[in-house]
Image (cartoon, grey):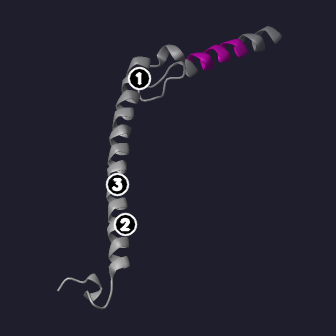
């Protein structure tokens, strides 16, 4: 009887191990051999390029905000009743 139990246990373990290693096509790879390293590097480089573009846009937006802030500060400083508080007619 113990041999039968051992045999069934080994069979069950081997079936479970075989099932665990079989992957569906939409599953994430779990071992280094299954990873598409070159594809991941290409994707990361593309991400870095997009990130650089976003940083450039953010920098340009900050420059515009800084200029606008300076203009508003000058308008506030020069606003008076004589010039209509810098309101264009």
Judge whether residue 9 is colored magenta: yes
Asked if disc 2 and disc 1 are in contact, CB closer than 8 Å, the reply is no
Between label 2 and label 1, give the one nearer the viewer. 2
Q: Which residue is drawn at 50% across and 13% down?
A: 33
Give the mark, 2 or 3, whose residue is nearer the N terminus.
Answer: 3
Return the residue at label 2.
69
Expressed as whole percent of the image width and height from the top left, the position of residue 68 reads: 32, 65
Quarter of the image for residue 54 reads top left
Above or below 30: residue 62: below
Query: How busy is the neighbourhood of tag 1: few (under 14 within 10 Å), some, or many (20 plus)?
Result: few
Give the mark, 2 or 1, whose residue is nearer the N terminus.
Answer: 1
In the structure shown, which secondary structural element does the residue marked by tag 2 occupy? helix
> Can residue 1 be seen from the camera position used here?
no
Expressed as whole percent of the image width and height from the top left, the position of residue 6 reads: 76, 12
Q: Give the alpha-carbon distance from disc 2 to disc 1, as whole Å.
A: 41 Å
Q: Give the alpha-carbon distance from disc 2 to disc 3, as whole Å.
A: 10 Å
Return the residue at label 3.
63
Return the residue at label 1.
41
Q: What stretch is highlighted in magenta?
A: 8-18
Between label 3 and label 1, give the one nearer the viewer. 3
């Amino acid at each position: 009887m113990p041999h039968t139990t051992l045999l069934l246990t080994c069979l069950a373990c081997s079936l479970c191990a075989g099932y665990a290693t079989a992957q569906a096509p939409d599953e994430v790879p779990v071992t280094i051999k299954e990873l598409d390293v070159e594809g991941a590097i290409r994707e990361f480089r593309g991400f870095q390029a997009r990130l650089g573009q976003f940083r450039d846009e953010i920098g340009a937006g900050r420059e515009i905000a800084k200029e606008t802030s300076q203009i508003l500060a000058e308008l506030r400083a020069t606003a008076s009743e004589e010039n209509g508080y810098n309101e264009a007619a």
